[in-house]
């Protein structure tokens, strides 16, 4: 699925309030009296649509004056749709007619996502001076749920005003960049850097060089991309074929070269030629000797924080692992106050909200007191969601587009990169102290669902290789910062269940493709102990009967990896080329939960059966360290899903009441497990749990 990080929705809801209508925008209202094959309901801010046939559509109320296509050509709204729409068709009238339509994709989205339709893209609409009404046709499938808000007309933004020539040039630049990256990763060079050991003061670099003149070791800063403008920060002349050189770790102005990679080059005038792949530091001295921890149970909770009234679940359920959302914008305030902490970079100072840090401390300490493994999820909101506007603008990726809920961090300039490092360094040091004063974060999950990056880690429309080039730099920063504090900490890549397919091929990429690119970068530039944070929801987020998933097969070519075929992920990480130093990489199932379509006995039993089914699989898979159940408590802002262990907090009958899946979850990993799970066997259609386990070869 577009595994759109429900986990993130707790943070999304906190920062993504309904957008205000800008001056000059024209609000649009839907006509409740004339709908076809759908039901339409309105809450205070949201339209809720449920399709009920193969031709569902709804119209807007007629405007008093015709639309000025030149002034406000963009129809826009925010939407959530767990199902997605196979084709959204927009009619402009009068006149009603097939020629007066625009078709666009409306992919599945589990978080509020903007969508924009340019009325100028249809010549008949563009020239029509009499349009007063629009109609939205939501594909041809019944039982599709869509939520809409902020429906309006607006002026075109700068990107939408670009000429076709500008767009073509930008696309060609992206193609050239993608080809340059692919060629670099696939190249065979005559030399190599084989190891870089860091001490507190120096970097010791070892490698093999070709027998050639004009040979140099070059420092390649993390913000310098591989393009036509590329230049190196510093070079050191080399001689001979055995490279053994020690350089200062820090520059005169205090920059830590730990965040640079190093490469062998030959230099002739202004022309530099690579003689090796680049290489990052392999060995990093840690400030502490924190013990390695593995979860005492695979049972976990996703997006956890204290104060949601059911904190006792940590003990009652026997929780062994948690995820926690670090939404960076919330940590920073624009002005100093007596109780704030400070971080500085590039001559600028920003101020940490002490209240946010202390709230986080309480959650981390509650986990530490119980011996729970904590994974922090690093999220970078776009600039509009920062009260410290200068830092928000600095960290927003320059290619960020409005379709993104979160942004890829901006690692394209020294200033922005160092600001990002300074903020993460504060978090890493706070939660990796030897005395455990504030609790401990054992690993970081870098951002959310990078394969759905256009939504959750946006840096514009990028090829898979170019997207990974941007993302893996943030992964490296996370790993380098964590390992300076904790020798056992790792950075994790976050992925949806779309393994070799994607619900939005124009903007998103299969998780298997991105993993392969991450391996390519790791093998080319120095392998390291990154892990995988996977979200193997059932094939349909609404359908708990995951054992019926047809697009989840027991093959590396499967379209999806879900509860049904989770053994495929285990087999994939055990392949020799995927291992790190001969060891299987850490895997956490960091966001998923079976849905109960409603609170009927049948739905609740099927939800619990789905969890019992998956548990019998993952308990046997040593690669999977934890299962962080998300969402822990049903959330009314997740497109109609009820994937929690508990009911809605405002449920009329039993607010936040424990569902059958809660009682099952409590029994898992205890002597009562098989008795508590037995109810699921006839629901699944098997007589013994061995029938649910895949034992054949996967390839």
Image: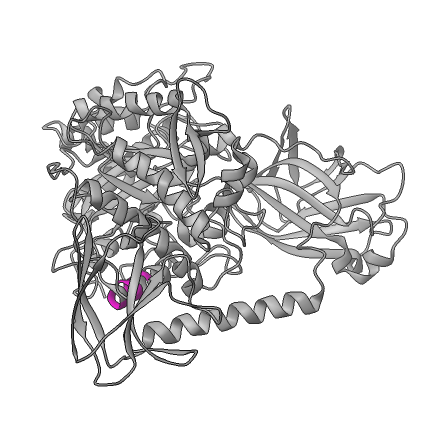
Q: Is residue 57 magenta?
A: no
Q: Residue 221 location in percent, x, y?
A: 36, 59
Check the image and report above or below for 343 versus 92: above
Residue at 22%, 82% in the rendered image: 210
Asked whether the viewer can see residue 533, the reply is no
Going by the picture, which residue comes out furthest to the bottom?
A: 212
Q: Quadrant of residue 191?
A: bottom left
User: Residue 237: x percent and y percent?
Assistant: 26, 73
Q: Is residue 685 above or below residue 475?
A: above
Relative placement, left or right, of 55 versus 366 is right
Which one is in front, 415 or 195? 415
How many numbered discs, if any? 0
Report whether residue 578 is seen. Answer: yes
Q: Main secondary structure of the magenta part?
A: helix
Which residues are the magenta region? 518-524
**Between residues 174 and 610, which one lies in front from this camera angle?**
174
Q: Position of residue 515 (x, y in %)?
A: 32, 59
Q: Residue at x 38, y 61 (%)?
A: 500
Which quadrant does the C terminus fall into?
A: bottom left
Which quarter of the picture shows residue 58?
top right
Please provide percent x and percent y for residue 455: 50, 47
Q: Nearer the viewer, residue 552 or 22?
A: 22
Q: Is residue 404 left or right of residue 594?
A: right
Q: Which of the colour schemes (rainbow, by chain, secondary structure, one colour) is used?
A: one colour
The residue at the point 38 percent across, 22 percent down is: 354
> In the picture shown, does residue 311 fall above or below 466?
above
Q: Give the residue furthest to the front.
A: 252
Q: Is residue 519 magenta?
A: yes
Q: Is residue 58 left or right of residue 292?
A: right
């Amino acid at each position: 699925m577009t595994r759109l990080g429900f986990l993130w929705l707790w943070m999304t809801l906190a920062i993504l309030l309904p957008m205000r209508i800008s001056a000059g925008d024209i609000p649009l209202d839907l006509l409740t009296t004339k709908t076809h094959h759908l039901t339409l309901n309105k809450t205070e801010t949201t339209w809720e649509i449920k399709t009920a046939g193969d031709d569902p559509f709804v119209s807007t109320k007629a405007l008093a004056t015709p639309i000025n296509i030149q002034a406000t050509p963009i129809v826009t709204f925010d939407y959530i749709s767990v199902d997605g729409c196979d084709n959204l068709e927009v009619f402009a009238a009068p006149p009603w007619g097939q020629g007066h339509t625009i078709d666009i994709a409306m992919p599945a989205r589990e978080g509020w996502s903007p969508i924009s339709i340019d009325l100028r893209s249809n010549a008949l609409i563009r020239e029509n001076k009499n349009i007063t009404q629009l109609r939205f046709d939501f594909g041809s499938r019944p039982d599709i749920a869509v939520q809409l808000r902020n429906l309006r007309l607006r002026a075109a933004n700068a990107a939408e005003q670009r000429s076709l020539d500008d767009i073509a040039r930008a696309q060609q630049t992206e193609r050239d960049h993608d080809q340059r990256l692919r060629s670099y990763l696939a190249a065979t060079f005559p030399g190599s850097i084989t190891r870089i050991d860091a001490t507190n003061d120096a970097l010791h670099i070892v490698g093999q060089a070709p027998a050639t003149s004009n040979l140099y070791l070059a420092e390649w800063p993390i913000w310098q991309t591989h393009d036509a403008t590329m230049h190196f920060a510093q070079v050191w002349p080399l001689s001979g074929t055995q490279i053994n050189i020690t350089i200062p770790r820090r520059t005169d102005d205090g920059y830590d070269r730990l965040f640079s990679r190093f490469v062998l080059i030959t230099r002739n005038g202004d022309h530099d030629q690579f003689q090796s792949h680049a290489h990052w530091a392999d060995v990093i001295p840690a400030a502490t000797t924190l013990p390695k921890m593995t979860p005492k149970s695979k049972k976990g909770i996703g997006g956890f924080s204290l104060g949601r009234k059911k904190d006792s679940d940590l003990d009652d359920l026997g929780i062994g692992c948690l995820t926690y959302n670090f939404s960076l914008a919330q940590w920073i305030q624009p002005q100093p106050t007596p109780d704030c902490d400070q971080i500085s970079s590039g001559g600028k100072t920003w101020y940490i909200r002490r209240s946010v840090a202390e709230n986080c401390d309480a959650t981390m300490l509650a986990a530490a007191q119980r011996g729970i493994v904590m994974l922090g999820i690093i999220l970078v909101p776009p600039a509009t969601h920062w009260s410290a506007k200068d830092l928000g603008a600095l960290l927003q990726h320059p290619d960020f587009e409005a379709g993104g809920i979160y942004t890829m961090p901006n690692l394209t300039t020294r200033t922005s990169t160092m600001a990002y490092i300074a903020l993460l360094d504060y978090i890493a040091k706070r939660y990796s102290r030897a005395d455990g004063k504030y609790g401990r974060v054992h690993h970081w999950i870098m951002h959310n669902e990078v394969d759905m990056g256009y939504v959750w880690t946006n840096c514009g429309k990028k090829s898979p290789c170019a997207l990974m080039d941007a993302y893996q730099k943030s992964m490296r920063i996370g790993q380098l910062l964590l390992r300076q504090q904790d020798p056992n900490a790792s950075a994790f890549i976050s992925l949806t269940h779309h393994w070799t397919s994607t619900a939005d091929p124009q903007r998103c990429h299969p998780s298997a493709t991105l993993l392969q690119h991450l391996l390519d970068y790791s093998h080319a530039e120095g392998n390291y102990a990154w892990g995988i944070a996977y979200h193997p929801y059932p094939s349909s987020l609404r359908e708990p009967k995951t054992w019926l998933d047809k697009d989840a097969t027991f093959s590396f070519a499967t379209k999806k990896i879900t509860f049904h075929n989770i053994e495929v992920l285990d087999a994939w990480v055990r392949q020799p080329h995927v291992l790190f130093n001969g060891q299987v990489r850490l895997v956490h199932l960091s966001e998923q939960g079976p849905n109960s379509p409603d609170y009927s006995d049948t739905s609740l039993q099927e939800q619990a059966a789905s969890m019992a089914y998956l548990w019998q699989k993952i308990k046997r898979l040593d690669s999977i360290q934890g299962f962080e159940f998300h969402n822990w408590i049903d959330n009314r802002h997740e497109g109609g899903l009820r994937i929690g262990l508990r009911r809605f907090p405002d449920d009329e009958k039993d607010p936040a009441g424990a569902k059958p899946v809660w009682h099952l979850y409590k029994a898992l990993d205890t002597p009562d497990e098989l008795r508590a799970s037995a109810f699921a066997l006839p629901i699944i259609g098997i007589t013994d749990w061995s029938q649910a386990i895949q034992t054949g070869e996967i390839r």
